[in-house]
Amino acid sequence: MSSNSFGKLFTVTTFGESHGPAIGCVIDGCPPGLAIAPEEFRHDLARRATGRSRYTSQRHEADEVEILSGVYEGRTTGTPIALLIRNTDQRSKDYGDIASSFRPGHADYTYWQKYGIRDPRGGGRSSARETTMRVAAAVLAKKWLAEHHAVRVRGYLAQIGDITPDAFDWDAVEQNPFFWPDAVQVPALENHINALRKSGDSVGARVNVVADGVPPGWGEPIYGKLDGDLASALMSINAVKGVEIGDGFAAVAQRGSEHRDEMGMDGFASNHAGGILGGISSGQPVIASIALKPTSSILIPGRSVNLAGEPVEVVTKGRHDPCVGIRATPIAEAMVALVLIDHALRHRAQCCDVGPVAPRIP
Amino acid sequence: MSSNSFGKLFTVTTFGESHGPAIGCVIDGCPPGLAIAPEEFRHDLARRATGRSRYTSQRHEADEVEILSGVYEGRTTGTPIALLIRNTDQRSKDYGDIASSFRPGHADYTYWQKYGIRDPRGGGRSSARETTMRVAAAVLAKKWLAEHHAVRVRGYLAQIGDITPDAFDWDAVEQNPFFWPDAVQVPALENHINALRKSGDSVGARVNVVADGVPPGWGEPIYGKLDGDLASALMSINAVKGVEIGDGFAAVAQRGSEHRDEMGMDGFASNHAGGILGGISSGQPVIASIALKPTSSILIPGRSVNLAGEPVEVVTKGRHDPCVGIRATPIAEAMVALVLIDHALRHRAQCCDVGPVAPRIP
Amino acid sequence: MSSNSFGKLFTVTTFGESHGPAIGCVIDGCPPGLAIAPEEFRHDLARRATGRSRYTSQRHEADEVEILSGVYEGRTTGTPIALLIRNTDQRSKDYGDIASSFRPGHADYTYWQKYGIRDPRGGGRSSARETTMRVAAAVLAKKWLAEHHAVRVRGYLAQIGDITPDAFDWDAVEQNPFFWPDAVQVPALENHINALRKSGDSVGARVNVVADGVPPGWGEPIYGKLDGDLASALMSINAVKGVEIGDGFAAVAQRGSEHRDEMGMDGFASNHAGGILGGISSGQPVIASIALKPTSSILIPGRSVNLAGEPVEVVTKGRHDPCVGIRATPIAEAMVALVLIDHALRHRAQCCDVGPVAPRIP
Amino acid sequence: MSSNSFGKLFTVTTFGESHGPAIGCVIDGCPPGLAIAPEEFRHDLARRATGRSRYTSQRHEADEVEILSGVYEGRTTGTPIALLIRNTDQRSKDYGDIASSFRPGHADYTYWQKYGIRDPRGGGRSSARETTMRVAAAVLAKKWLAEHHAVRVRGYLAQIGDITPDAFDWDAVEQNPFFWPDAVQVPALENHINALRKSGDSVGARVNVVADGVPPGWGEPIYGKLDGDLASALMSINAVKGVEIGDGFAAVAQRGSEHRDEMGMDGFASNHAGGILGGISSGQPVIASIALKPTSSILIPGRSVNLAGEPVEVVTKGRHDPCVGIRATPIAEAMVALVLIDHALRHRAQCCDVGPVAPRIP
C-alpha cells in the first residue's frame, strides 16, 4: 500500500496541497448499499473547519464535497468513492517568505531534504488542510459503524496548556468551539486563547477519543493490533507527538493489582486497558488520547536558515491557529472511526464463521 | 500484508506460540551481500532473554538461532531469510488453570472472543516469547543500518514505577540487568524488584530508545510517516500502552516558542521534536519513549470468570516477570531498527535520484 | 493495498464510472523532480480515445486532464498526483434497457451478484472508460523510464479475428487507426471492420507489447516476479482472456534445446523467453502478448434474463467498438510501463548497492 | 506485502532453497477452527513429488511436514501456521559446474545480475522445490473451500509437446503419473517421455485447472480481479509462459455472437468465459490453462558464458524432469485454490451483508 493510503480493507487515499486547486480522497472497499448524500459531510467538516470561531485560523473554505464516483442513486455501489473539495480561499502571498527559508519546528526543512523540491504555499502537502479529507472519509465510516454495530466515536479536548477540565459532560462538548467538556470553563478558555493570540505564541493540547459499542474481537495480533493501528493512525495527524491507550503513561507507576481490569459476568470493574487487551477489543469502550504540540507557525521570531544556508529570523504571518489541538478533535475521531471500520471488515473476513462466543462479558 | 508481518520492504513475518515446538521468522527484502553468522544473534537475544538474572522470569531457553534459508556462504542472497528457534523449556502444567479461566487484564478473554479457540499454554501467541524473533530479525537491521548509514539504535529503562534515573550514562546501561543508566541506583532497584516479587505484584516501566545517525529524509507522509510507523511498531510490543516521540505529552503544556527547535548551519538548538518533523527525519537523533503496563500475570488473586461464565479467582503461578518493562529495552530497540531499515529502503526507492540536498544542517 | 490500486511503490488508484461526473486517478510514490505538463497527456489519451476513427465507438470525450495535486512549478514533488477528467458525452438513455436486464457475456450479472447494486449507465465501473486513467498515469511512467533507463514501451495489434500481419514495421503502427504493423493491409482491415459493424457483430484481437531497454535485474521472485506482475496487470484490462510472455503457448510444443536462449558475450542468440528468466528481466526486450475477446455489446440479439428472473432477448444499442482490441494497444503499453516503473523502484530499494554486475551480456 | 508472500488475507509466505537445510511456509489469516493433521499434507505432496515415477526427477524427498505453530489440539487457532520440511536428499556436487557458469534459459544469469550473489546449489531459490510449500499451504485452502463452499479444484495435463488427449475422464487423471485424462494414451506417453529422456532433451506442456462450485461474486475489480489474480498466481509457477482463462487465445478469432455465454434461469448455455466476467466469478466453473516451457536443464550442450565472461558449453547433469509440466498439475491446483480462498475472505469482508442476490442463475 502506498503511503498516502490508509487502511487495509477500507482504504482511504488522500491527495492535495493546502493551496493547490483541490483536495480529495478515494475510499476503496466500502461495503455496498450504504446511503450517503453530499450534505451528510457538512456537519463534521464544519466542526473541523477553520474560520468558524475567533479561536482558529481565519481561512474560510466552503468545504463543499462533490461525490465523483462510487455512489448510485444515493447508495454506495462497492466501487471506489472519490470525494473532491475545491480550494477557494488561497492566499499564497502570505507565504512568500516561507519559500526561501525554513520555519523552525516545521516540515519545511524535512520535505526539502527528502524530495529536493517542495510546494511552499501554505505548507503544501504538510498542511493540516489534508485532514479535511480524513474527516470526510470518516463520515462514511461513522455511519456504517453506527448502523451495523451501534458504535459511536466521540472526542473532546482534554487539556490545553496547563488547563484541564474541572467537570465532564458530553453534552457540553459540542456547544463550544473548543470541544471542551466543562461549559463553566469556556469563558476562561476564550480569554486564554485571546491572550495567546495577542502574544503571537501558540500552545499544545490533549484530545481524548472514546468509541462506545465496539464488540469484542476486533484487532489482529501481532502487527495489526487494534492499538497498534490506532497509534499509527493518530500519530499521523499533524502535530501529534504522543498516543496513549487507556491509562497510557500513567501505567508506568501502577501496580499490576491496580491496573488489571477485574471482570465478572456483570461487566468489567474498571477500564485501565482502554478497551484493548492483546491488541484485540474487549467489548469495553475503546479510549485513546493524543498529545498535540504547539504549532511552530507563530509571530514570535525564531532562528533558522534560508535556502542559501544563511542564518535568518523567521516570523510566520498569515492565518494560523494559536492551538492546533482545538480542531484536532474531529480529526482524531475520524482516524479512530477509520481504524475501527477497517478492523470490523478484517475481523469478519477471517472470523465471521466463529459467531458469538460464550461467555461474553457485557 | 498479513497481520503477522511487519514492514513494507524489509518485511518480517513471525510465527510461533510460547509453548509450541518452535518460534521463528521470515525476513523478506533484506539487501543482498550482508555478512551474517548464527552467533551474531546471541548478544541481543541474551539481552532479551528470561532467566539471565533474578529479576526476570526464570524460564531458561537456549534461544539458539538456526538459519534455514537466504544466506549462502555467510552472506545474505536477497531471498527470504528464515530463522528458527526451538522451544525447549516448556512447562505447560504451569498453565493448567489458565485453560479454563481468563486472567484479568490479559489477552486470554479477547483471543477467545475473537477466534473461539485459543492455545492457553503460556499465553500462546500473545506471550512475549514472540518478541524473541523481533530481536533476532533486528540483528540484521541494526547491522545493515550501522554499515550503510552509521545508525546506532540504543535503549534504556527510563522509569520503573515511581523511580527515575538520577544520572545518565550510556556505558552504565549495559552493565546491569535493568538497562538502567545510573549505576549508583542499581542496588536500590534490585531491592525494589525483590520486594515486588515477594509481594506477588508487578509494576510498570518506561523505556526510551535513541537512534543516532539517521539522515534527514526518512519517512513517508502522510500515512507512512516515520513517527506513525514507529508508533505502530512500538505499540505492538506486549504491554505497551503509550508512545511518545521527542517531548511527547510534555508538549501539551509547552508554548510554540519553547517547543520549536531553532536551527542554524551549526546545528539545531534543541530536539523537542525527537528528530522527526512532518513525519520525516530531520537529521537529529530520533527519540521514542514507551509506557509498559505492569503485567497482569501476578500471584495476587483477581476476580474473573471461567469458560462456563462462573465467577472465579485467578492466581497466575508459573514463571513471570515482576516488571515486563525490564526486558523490553532490546525489544523496543529492535522495533525502532526494523522501522528505520524499512524506511531507508523506501526512501531510496522513491528518492535516490535526489542526492544530498543543500543546505544540510549538521 | 485496496483493489482499485495498482503497483507496490508506484501506486495508481483509479476511480470513476463510465457515465458518472468524472474519472480520475491518484499516482502515489512518483519520484520527485519529473517535469510534467497537462498537454503531455494528450498524445496517448488520443491514441486510446473513442471517436477518432470510424472503427471505434463514436463516443466523443475531450479527455482533458486536470492536474489537481503533486506538481509544483511543472515538476512532481513526490506527493500524490491526482488527475481528473470530466465526463462530457454521456448518453445514459442509450442504456435504459441494460438497467433491468443482464447483457450475456458482460459484467452486468456478476456485479449484481457481488454487490447487490450496480450503476448500469454505460457499464458503470466495468466500462473500458476506466482505462483512460491507466493511460494517463502511464504517461508519467513512460517518461520516467525513458529519462532514467532509456526504456521504450511500444505495442501493436498482432491479430484481429483470423488476420495476422504480413509484414512488420514499427513506423507503420502509428500511422493507421488499428496500430497495425503492415501498411499494405490497412485498407483490407478497414473493409473487414466495416463489414463487421454492418453485421452487428464483434471480433477478438491480439495485442503485442515490446519494452526495449529494460536492464537485467528487475522483478522479485517468487510472488512479485516481473512476468507474474505483468500477467496480473494485463489480465486486468477489460476483455483480456490470455497473457503470454515470449513464446507463450507456443512453448508447449517446443523442445528445451529449441526454447532456451543461448548466450555469449556478444548477446543472446534468440529471445524465446521474452526477456524474463526466473521472474527477473534478462536485459533482452520484454515481450508480452494478450488475447482480447470480442465484446459482448453487440446488435445481434442474445438470450438472457432480467431482474425478475424472466427470459429476455438482449440487444446492445449505443456506441460500441466492433473490436475492443483496436484501442487496447495503448492500454496494454500503459500497464507494461506501470509494472516496469514499479519494479525499477522496487529493485533499487533492495539492490541499489549491488551496482553493475559482471559479466553483463549486451 | 513482500514478494515472497502471496495473498491479501489468506497470506502464504514461503522460504527455502533447493539444497538448503529446509523449506517452509507461514500461512497467515487462516480462519480459526479448521481441523488439520500432519498426515493430511501427504496426498498432495506425493502428487507433486519427484522420484515417484521414472518420468520425473529422481530426487527422493520424504516431504514430511512439521506443523510448528497455529494449530492447537488439531484445529487452526487463527494465528500464523508455520510448516517446515527438512531437505534430505541434497547432492550439491551435481551442481558444481553451475556455480561458475550460467545455464542458458535458466534463472542463473538473472539472479546473478539482480543480487550480485546467488546460491547455485540446485538452482537455489529458483528451483521448483519451492513449489512444495505452495502445495502444502493449499491443502488448508482446499479443505476450507470444500467445507465452506463445496468448491473442488482439479487439474490435468492437457498437452505435452504435440500430444493432446483423445478422450476425457476425470477418473483417469489420478491413475497415471502424468495426470492425463485418457487412460488409453498413457503407454504411448510413457514411450514418448522415455525417448525424450534418452535424447537428453525436454518438452513443454499445458495444464488445465477447473474449479467447480465457486459461487458468483468472488473477485475485486479493477486491480484485484479474480482472473487478474489467477494470472499472477499461475505465472509465478516455474516455467510458466502463458495463462488463459476460459477460451483464452482462441477468443482472438471468435465473434461476439459466438463467444458470449447466453443465459437463462436454467443455466448458462456455454462457458467461453471460464467462469469469470468483469473480474468476478459468475457461478460457472472457473477454468484456467497454463503453458509450461521445456526445462532448460538438459543434457544437450548449450552455448553460454562463465563468471569470467568467457564462452562455455553448458550441460546440466543431475536429476531433472524431462517435462516439468507433468508435476505442475498439483502446483497449478494449489495456486488456484490459494487465490480462491483469498477471494472468498475478501468478498465476505466487503459484501457479507449483501446476502444471496436474485436472480441467481444455477
Image (cartoon, coloured by chain):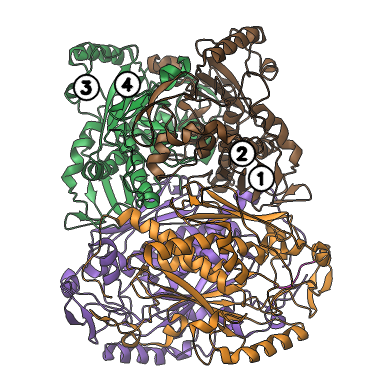
Chain colours: A orange, B purple, C brown, D green
List x then y, in percent, for residue B175. 44, 80
Give the secondary structure at mark 3.
loop
Structural distance between the alpha carbons of marks 4 and 1 = 49 Å
Nearer-N-terminus badge (4/3): 3
Which residue is disc 1 drawn over? C83
Query: Residue B211: which numbered mark, if any?
Result: none
- Give the residue type that dot 4 points to: Cys
Q: Nearer the viewer, residue A249 or B348?
A: A249
Residues drawn in magenta? A101-105
Q: Are marks 1 and 3 on the same chain?
A: no
Crowdedness of circle 2 by 10 Å Cα count: few (<14), some, many (20+)?
A: many
Which residue is disc 3 drawn over? D54
Query: Residue C133: which numbered mark, if any?
Result: 2
Tags 1 and 2 in contact by the CB under 8 Å rule? yes
Give the secondary structure at mark 1.
strand
Q: Nearer the viewer, residue B35 or A314?
A: A314
Quadrant housing residue D295: top left
Q: Main secondary structure of the magenta part?
A: loop
Structural distance between the alpha carbons of marks 1 and 3 = 59 Å
List x then y, in percent, for residue C151. 65, 31
Q: Nearer the viewer, residue B166 or C18?
A: C18
User: Residue A88, relative to residue C53: is it above or below?
Assistant: below
Structural distance between the alpha carbons of marks 4 and 3 = 12 Å
Which residue is disc 4 drawn over? D323
- Give the residue type that dot 3 points to: Arg
